[in-house]
Image: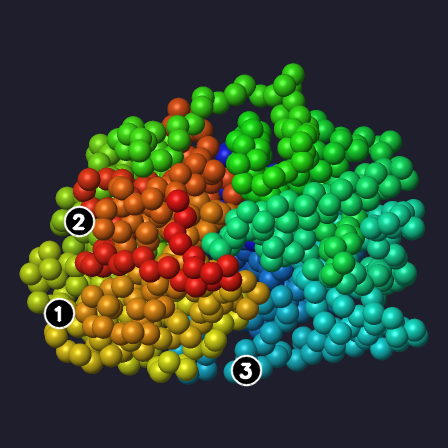
Amino acid sequence: MDSRYEAFCMASPLFYDALRSATNAGVSFSTANRALPDGWRREEQDDWLVFLPENLDLPMQGWKIHVSACLDNAERVLDKVWDYCVPRGLEFKFLRSSPALWLRSSKYAPRGYSGKLVTIYPPDEDACERVLTELGELLRGEPGPYILSDLRWGEGPLYVRYGGFASRYCVADGGQVVLAIADDKGELVPDRRDPVFYVPPWVSLPDFLAPHLAARNAVTVADLPYTVESVLHFSNGGGVYLGRDTRTGRQVVLKEGRPHAGLDSTGADAVARIDREHEVLRRLAGVPGVPEVYDLFDVGDHRFMAMQHVAGRPLHRALVRRYPLIDVGAVPEDFAAYAEWATKVHGQIEKTLHGIHERGVVYGDLHLFNIMIDDDDTVTLLDFEVTSLVTDNARPGLGNQGFAAPSGTTGADVDRYALACLRLALFLPMTQLLWLSRAKVHHFAEIIAEHFPVPDGFLAEAVRVIAPPPAASPQPEPLPPMTLDGDWPSLRDRMVRGILASASPEREDRLFPGDIEQFRLNGLGLAYGAAGVLHALSVTGAPRQPELEEWLLNRVKKPPHGTMLGLYDGLHGVAFTLDHLGHRQQALDLLDMCLSDDWQSLGLDLLGGLAGIGLNLAHFADRTGDAGLRELALRAAQLVGERLGDVESVPTTSGLANPYAGLFRGSSGPALLLMRAYDLTGSPDYLDRAAVALRQDLRRCVTRDNGAMEVDEGWRTMPYLAAGSIGIGIALDQYLDRRSDDEFAAAGESIHQAAQARMYVQSGLFAGRAGIVLYLAGRSADPRTDPAVAAQVRGLGWHAMPYAGGLAFPGDQLLRLSMDVATGTAGVLLAVGAARSDTPVHLPLIPPAKAARPRVPVSGRHGLVSPIL
């Protein structure tokens, strides 16, 4: 689960959207409507409203003040801040609405910016001290969540940190473009916004802040009878820690609740939920499958609960370790054994819930991540913080969409619905889609029954609870089978119909709904924005859309501040698309704009760095005959070669704190540019450096027991296109077209096995089954008749959803539909086009290797592994 997506599920039931899109229509704090005096202006920045005097000359960075508040005192606090700042000519900004404040205070809000209602920009340190002193007195006693990134002023709602006043950007160590401040040498460095107070090393803490830092550091846990050994989890509501009772030596779990933070949909904060969980666990003492609670205590104003440490692993990880649909070597006996295990586990959980209900309690939060299973397959439920009494007939204030009951379901029926979803999720963990269409339950039951020997009635019970005949919503029209044997134009037209129906040219922030990344990247690029969708429509034969092209042309005349430059995440990709669509001069103008920026300092990757930019420059050099662009493309390749390092310059695992492997964020993208430079110059040095890049990515791969090579992320392995092994496989095939290499050839065939699984949780191009289809189609001599390609295209039907008389596909996390290339319907369209179209369809600037690769069986744990049929 990626908690970032929760915030983008609140504005629309169908698509990821920014909350500001729902709150711009007048739902604002009343303070926002106050009249400004002459000489002042108001600006809008996403969820923020900015108020500043005309001709104000502020420094680019300095000590800024944040004001914290709760939902019930926010209006009062804002009025006091306004009355203080406006007469004194201080620039300030505040969140536009109560929903925006709730979002920043909710349980899964990013901890680095949680609690901030107002930001004030003092012009110097003297003014900062004066504002803190005077406004602090005016706001004395006003409650608000603690702002973790800042230093608190006294015991009130004012906080301070050193950071940027103006938006400036730099490239971080990992190659990402981030907000920046200048160091003592004038060089831009990342403006750190971690959930801990930080003073840059070249900045001196003002004397007036020293007592407050000392007070912060004086908080101690030395007198507690518990020690913290490690962190298990952090949320905005507090931490969960593995600890030990120093009196008994017993290992415990310590759960923390921060006041006024971690709000749920009822408005309850983390402290209230800790108190509720403590009370309920005492009531449920002795119920099998319910952990024991030991203690409740405070540290400062934070509430802590000590409870039993439950050994084992979460059910979702236990499932993955056994799950035969992702094992290309699984045989019928594996499916039978798994079905027996899964039904027994479900039976245990059902029995535990029955015991909880007998004590008059509704659990309210059943899902795969809240169930622990030990080595003996004994289950224990975790997280009782949203429980209620059966007699309350309540709905939980938090929930997992894949198990959350429909509106109107209350009391114990909430748990019964989740149990029904669990019947499906144990065999097909895609129940998030039921939130978009409960009718999908019938399709899921058919898929499960086709693959697993489940007991009679097991699936029928799930269907009965989730979509009971009397209350079922109207059935959508039947979906056509997603096979290569059907009519490709008809299938294409259904996807195109869904994509075009979702377009919103009246909006400025996006043209098509897609992944949450589109809001960070301004909705323009190939991966997550309009350029990618328009390109996919064009190359698959859909009719031109002049109005939608005009939207893109207008948006890039003056791109929004902070728009990225890269091929897949930014303006280079837009230039590529505009040229493809016939807007040559506008494309060249945009290219000139990109080249006027500091593009040579970007990272090396294909998504937004030098690899993609270099490929695009080489492409435009070919298209225009411009020798200057050719030289710039080679300059990009030279920089990549110089900065690449050697094979051991990367760690042996990908992601988390380490640089990613793979085609889009790893070293395989730079390898493509180096190979292109070899094609342009004939210099073998470029091919030698490409080999180093590929070995860097292979260094971060492991070969599983079934013979499939995947990227190793430490806690999981990944086969996918963007950050998994099949993207590396595409680059390996390109290299083998230019130079033979036995190691690369063997790795390519092991990677091919990773594209043979029956199940991929997501459908998207970058991290799902569509990427598998694209890879297999590119390797096949004739993808239209290839049974392995056909099987994967047919599998895309598992995710297909009806929308606007057409077809649409869910984005990453499966919580909402998406139309973009990286995660959604346009990416599926591109992949199926590669598999089915009579004309070549492929990723922008990444055509398949010239020679189709033979599929050589690889030895797995059950002997030879053959492609699925």
Chain-order first, disc 3 or disc 2 = 3
Rate crowding at label 2 as few (under 14), some (14 to 19) or many (20 or more) other CA atoms within 10 Å. some
Q: From this viewpoint, is residue 663 visible?
A: no
Residue type beneath disc 3: Pro
- In which quarter of the view is residue 128 placed? bottom right
Whether residues under marks 3 and 2 lie with C-beta atoms below 8 angstroms apart, the answer is no
User: Which residue bears the numbered disc 3?
Assistant: 201
Whether residues under marks 2 and 1 lie with C-beta atoms below 8 angstroms apart, the answer is no
Residue at the location (68% across, 56% down)? 314
Residue at the location (14% across, 49% down)? 584
Residue type beneath disc 2: Asp
- In which quarter of the view is residue 589 placed? bottom left
Q: Which of 792 and 54 is in front in this view?
A: 792
Chain-order first, disc 1 or disc 3 = 3
Whether residues under marks 1 and 3 lie with C-beta atoms below 8 angstroms apart, the answer is no
Left or right: residue 747 versus residue 337 is: left
Q: Residue furthest top?
A: 470
User: Which residue bears the numbered disc 2?
Assistant: 579
Q: What element carries label 1?
A: helix
User: Which residue bears the numbered disc 1?
Assistant: 680
Chain-order first, disc 2 or disc 1 = 2
Q: Which of 292 and 117 is in front in this view?
A: 292
Residue type beneath disc 1: Leu
Looking at the rendered image, the quarter that the C terminus falls into is top left
Residue at the location (8% across, 67% down)? 627
How far apart in space, not on screen, are marks 3 and 2 (Cα)?
47 Å
Where residue 452 appears, as percent x and y from the top left, is 58, 41
Q: From this viewpoint, is residue 422 visible?
A: yes
How far apart in space, not on screen, are marks 1 and 3 (Cα)?
46 Å
Residue at the location (67% across, 75% down)? 209
Q: Is mark 2 on a helix, strand or loop?
A: helix
How far apart in space, not on screen, are marks 2 and 1 (Cα)?
22 Å
